[in-house]
Structure formats: C-alpha cells, structure tokens
Image (cartoon, rainbow, N blue to C red):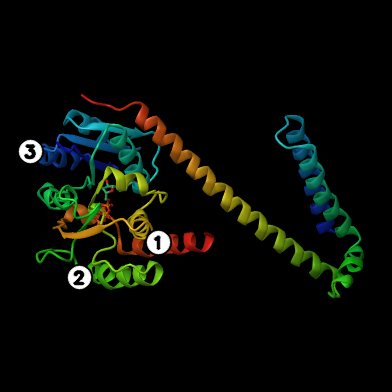
Amino acid sequence: MDSVFIVIPAFNEEKSIVGVIKDLFSRNYRNVVVVDDGSSDRTAEFAAEAGAEVLVHPINRGQGAGLRTGTDYALSKGADIIVHFDADGQMRAEDIASLVKPLKSGKAEVSFGSRFMAKKSNMPIVRKFLLRFGFKTFMRIMYGVSMSDPQSGFRAMTAGAARQIHITQRGMAHCSEIIEEVHRKKIPFIEVPVVIRYTEYSLKHGQSNLDGFRIVARLVWRKLLK
Amino acid sequence: MTPLQIVVVLFALFAFSRTLLRLRDSKISMKEFLLWNTVWISMAVIVFQPWVTDIVSQKFGISRGIDFVVYITILVILYLIFRLFVQLESMEQELTKIASTIAQQHPKKK
Ligand SMILES: Nc1nc2c(ncn2[C@@H]2O[C@H](COP(=O)(O)OP(=O)(O)OP(=O)(O)O)[C@@H](O)[C@H]2O)c(=O)[nH]1
Ligand SMILES: [Mg+2]
C-alpha cells in the first residue's frame, strides 16, 4: 500500500480548516499534516481537534516555508506520495485521486492540478486573464516551460521527486519554483484537471491580483541574483 | 562656527560615544571602531576645512571636492544597503530553518 500524505499549509484558517480535514478523512486520506504558520487564531487547535497531525511554526514564514516543513515531515514519516493542499476550502478532496493515479501507475513523478483544463470553474475573469496569459507567458520566457496553470498550488509528488525538489521560496513564489525544479531536473510530470472553488470567503481571504505582480518581482530578482 | 558646523560636531561626538560604548561591550571589533571613527572624524574635518576634499577630488578629475564626497558617500551607502539586503535574506532563511525544526520536533496530535 502506498502511503499518501496530505500537506496543508494554513495561516489563519480557523473558519475552514475543520471542514477541509473532514472532507479528506471522509475520502480515506488518513495522513493529514497541517502546518500552522504562526496563525493568530485557533487554526492549530481546531486542526488537532479534527484529528490532523499539526506542526506549528512559531512565527509566520509563508506558504512555501509551510509546504517545505510539511513535506520534509511527511518524508520523515515514510510517505510514498505527498499531496499539497489548501486550507481555505477551495480545493476538492475528490480531485486528489486523479492527481495520485498517474504517480501510482508510474506515468509521472509529479502531477500538477490545472484549473484551466477543467471546464467548470467560477474563477473571476480578471484573475483568469492574469493567470492564463500573464503567468503563462512569464513562465515560458523565464524558464521555457509551457504549462496551462503555473500558479496552481494543487499538486502531488512521489517521495523520490519530493527529495529532489528544493523549495526555497518562502512565499507564494514557490509555485513557479517547483515547476522550475521539475523542469531543470527533468522529473516526469503531468497536468491533471482540477476544480478550484472561488467563494466569497476565499476571495476576501486569499491573494489579490496585485500579489501576482509581487510574485513575478521576486522571481525576477532571484534569477538576477543567481 | 556656522550652525552646520555645530550640528556636525555634535553628531560626530555623539556617534563617537556610541561606537565607544559598542566597543566596550564588544558588539563591534577594534577594526570596526577605527573604521567608523575615521568616518566621523573625516566628517568633522571636512565641515571645517572643505578644501581638503579638493586635493583628493582633483586627482579623480572632479573639480569640487564636496561633489566628490557626495559621490563617494552615495556609493558607500548603496554598497551598505546591498550588504544589508544579503544579510537580511540569509537571516530570513535561518529563521525559516529554526521555525521548521521547532515545528517538526513537536508535532501535535490528538
Ligand atoms: N504556511 C502558510 N500558509 C499560508 C500563508 N498564507 C496563506 N497560506 C495558505 O496557503 C493556502 C492558499 O492561500 P491563499 O491565500 O488562498 O492563496 P491562493 O489559493 O494561491 O490564492 P487565491 O486564488 O486567492 O485563493 C491556504 O491554505 C492558506 O492558508 C502563510 O503565510 N503561511
Ligand atoms: Mg486560496
């Protein structure tokens, strides 16, 4: 049996975290690791209460850092497959199966969830434009990678791939970083359609379109320093 | 003394006392102490005898000594900012490492 670990970075998600964990449990994903990133609310407490394994960053270090902590931990616990999942309830646990399947069958080592391969999505139109044309073009120019949804945080990887992928970006820029790593190290990957829900909660709580520009700035800066 | 001279002398004295204190509780090394005090002393000298800068500046083909001082100061400041940037980033990475280690040492599970 392959052991699948779900890693969830969470920052002030007390309103949604319990529902997310329950959804995962109900689909028989038993190894749920929540990385509470110095939340000021009761995220860690609620997550532990709901039955997840909770790692707590004493101070806020960013989503990328949370993913790295959770992934390292999952590897140390003998995970065969690691899934990166969000705490805000936008991702659906039912999509995990389609991410994990190509890894189990040996078709790929990493699978990325793509919001644009699925037909139904209620993503706001401006966001859609920025992600589809903005980030996509940026990734192609910068790294020579063509992907339908480079800013997707929904992905799965085998333990072998996870050991090769080094997440050094603390913030949201880890999405592009992981793609770059996969590309550079020639790790076989696949894109899988997933549905991401855009609710009023997630839009208020999540990233603004402006953050996208900040991410691009960070990536360019890093490339220049290298 | 002009008001500017008074301000600069007072600042140099203040800065000197600070570096002396830092040296005493060994927050900075003797080398750093001397380096910083060279800066403060030069400031005081220049404000009283601006012509001394002309000697150096003319070697670099800049006629006004004070312009030369300003150029050099900007370069130094830019370099210091760059160093700060790099140090800050490495400190951030250290912080992340510590946070991650602490988190993994004490997993919470019901
Ligand atoms: N560890 C950690 N996780 C964070 C941080 N900020 C957000 N997250 C988590 O990362 C996930 C995604 O965050 P969002 O802010 O919704 O980002 P997004 O889903 O890329 O952007 P949207 O499209 O606006 O929803 C959620 O599970 C958040 O709790 C942070 O500072 N640290
Ligand atoms: Mg979100």
Answer with mark 1 or mark 3, whichever residue precedes in sequence.
Answer: 3
The x and y percentages for residue B32 are 76, 42
- The residue drawn where x is 16% and y is 58% is A198
Foreground of the two, A12 or B45:
A12
Residue A220 location, quadrant: bottom left
Disc marking residue A26:
3
The x and y percentages for residue A37 are 34, 39
In the image, farthest residue toward the front: A106
- Tell me the CA gap for discs 1 and 3: 37 Å
Q: Mark 2 points at which residue?
A: A125
* Mark 3 sits near ligand 1, with its Cβ under 8 Å away: no
Kind of residue at badge 1: Arg
- Tell me the CA gap for discs 3 and 2: 33 Å
Name the image quarter holding the N terminus of chain A.
top left
Q: In this view, does B18 lie to the left or right of A109?
A: right
Same-chain check, marks 1 and 2: yes
Label 3 Cα neighbours within 10 Å, binned few <14 / some 14-19 / many ≥20: few
Q: Is the residue under label 2 in contact with that under label 3 (CB below 8 Å)?
A: no
Q: Which chain carries label 1?
A: A
Question: So how many labels did they put on this image?
Answer: 3
Q: Is the residue under label 2 in contact with that under label 1 (CB below 8 Å)?
A: no
Q: Name the residue under label 1.
A: A214
User: Which structural element holds mark 2?
Assistant: helix
Residue B1 appears in the rendering: no
Kind of residue at badge 2: Ile
In the image, farthest residue toward the top: B110
Q: Which chain carries label 3?
A: A
